[in-house]
Image (tube, helix red, strand yellow):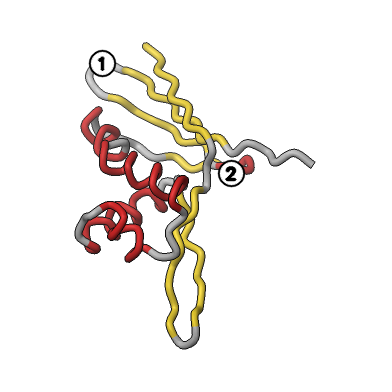
Amino acid sequence: MAQKSRTRIVHLYITSSTFASIFKRLRGDRSDYDFSGFQDLRQLLSKEKAKILHTIKNKNPNSIYQLAKFLARDFKAVFQDIKLLQKFGFIELQPESKGKRKRLKPVLAIDNLQVNIGFQ
């Protein structure tokens, strides 16, 4: 059976001077996220976060610590980026145990990102 594509759709509506956006959650669930301006969306879709998503997909790190090592970045900075990407449904953190140690494995929650811009 073919795996269903997981797509995140972002609708941006340009009003008088700001962007408003609606993220449609996977599996039919809907949650609204309002951006006060383009800068907030740009921060969410930054180059560093794109590197995180690319590294998770291609290198399949076992933990956030290993992801930070792959990226050659500070753990705390990567962890903050991971939390933001998780909040907006781009990744999931799967708990794993190895002996007495517990860790969170970052896994992509989407396969595609579609951005639609509408002018009102």
> Mark 2 sits on what residue?
29
- Tell me where residue 102 sits by quadrant: bottom left
Question: Residue at image x 31%, y 55%?
Answer: 70
Vertical placement of residue 47 versus 72, above or below: above
Q: For marks 1 and 2, give the CA distance.
A: 29 Å
In the rendered view of the protein, which quadrant contains the N terminus?
A: top right
Amino acid residing under circle 1: Ser
Question: Residue at image x 40%, y 65%?
Answer: 63
Whichever of labels 1 and 2 marks the residue nearer the N terminus, that label is: 1
Quick one: SS at disc 1?
loop
Instruction: Tell me the tag on residue 104.
Output: none
Q: Residue 71 or 87: which is nearer the viewer?
A: 71
In the rendered view of the protein, which quadrant contains the C terminus?
A: top left
Vertical placement of residue 97 versus 47, above or below: below
Residue at the extreme top of the image, as rendered: 119
Question: Residue at image x 40%, y 42%?
Answer: 54
Q: Residues within 10 Å of mark 1 (few under 14, many from 20)?
A: few
Q: Position of residue 116 (x, y in %)?
A: 44, 20
Q: Position of residue 48 (x, y in %)?
A: 26, 42
Q: Position of residue 98 (x, y in %)?
A: 49, 80
Instruction: Tell me the tag on residue 16.
Output: 1
Which-is-in-front pick, marks 1 and 2?
2
Quick one: SS at disc 2?
loop
Amino acid residing under circle 2: Asp
Question: Residue at image x 49%, y 48%?
Answer: 108
Residue at the extreme right of the image, as rendered: 1
